[in-house]
């Protein structure tokens, strides 16, 4: 009978994911703590992400896709004619505008 040595890493680096699958950072966890849950992924972290961007994990092929990130930005809602705060990833919705001057008084 032969002994088989299996090396188990002390910690495995996983990527923490946000509500939309966006990269939040990494954390090192012991293997027994890693479970299949929505807030983590065992993939390499994304390259550097620029201002106004988020890296979102495509779970089908485990690649990162850069998308616009205007969350927390105040924009003008062209339908209600009121300021709103962006709470989603991606390009601005058609009814949202950065420029209040281009939409005021236009019907």
Image (spheres, helix red, strand yellow):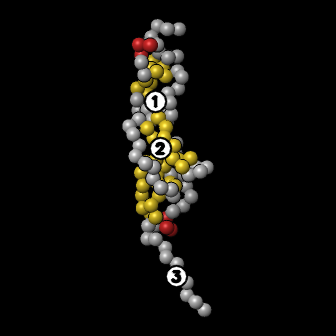
- Residue annotated with mark 3: 5
Specify whether 60 is left or right of 30. right
Name the one closer to the observer, 7 or 19.
7
Name the one closer to the observer, 47 or 78.
47
Nearest-to-viewer mark from 1 and 3: 3
Work out whether mark 3 precedes mark 2 in sequence or the reverse, and give the earlier one: 3
Tell me the SS state at disc 2.
strand
What residue do we see at 48% from left, 49% from top? Answer: 17
Nearest-to-viewer mark from 2 and 1: 2
- Residue annotated with mark 1: 86
- Residue annotated with mark 2: 55
Bin the neighbour count of mark 2 within 10 Å (Cα to Cα): few under 14, some 14-19, many 20 and up. many
Residue 46 in the image: state x and y as whole percent: 45, 49
Name the one closer to the observer, 61 or 84.
61
Q: Quadrant of the N terminus?
A: bottom right
Work out whether mark 1 precedes mark 3 in sequence or the reverse, and give the earlier one: 3
Bin the neighbour count of mark 1 within 10 Å (Cα to Cα): few under 14, some 14-19, many 20 and up. some
The residues bearing labels 2 and 1 have C-alpha atoms spaced at a distance of: 17 Å
What residue do we see at 56% from left, 52% from top? Answer: 62
Residue 3 in the image: state x and y as whole percent: 55, 87
Residue 5 in the image: state x and y as whole percent: 52, 82
Q: Residue lying farthest front?
A: 47
What residue do we see at 53% from left, 8% from top? Answer: 107
Tell me the SS state at disc 3.
loop
Above/below status of 17 relative to 6: above
Name the one closer to the observer, 49 or 96.
49
Above/below status of 23 relative to 71: below
């Amino acid at each position: 009978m032969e002994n088989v040595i299996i090396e188990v890493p002390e910690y495995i680096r996983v990527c923490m994911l946000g509500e939309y699958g966006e990269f939040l950072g990494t954390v090192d966890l012991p293997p027994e703590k890693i479970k299949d849950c929505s807030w983590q992924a065992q993939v390499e972290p994304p390259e550097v992400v620029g201002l106004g961007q988020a890296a979102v994990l495509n779970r089908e092929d485990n690649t990162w896709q850069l998308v616009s990130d205007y969350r927390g930005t105040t924009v003008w809602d062209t339908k209600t004619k009121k300021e709103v705060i962006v709470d989603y990833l991606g390009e601005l919705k058609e009814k949202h505008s950065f420029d209040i001057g281009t939409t005021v008084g236009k019907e």
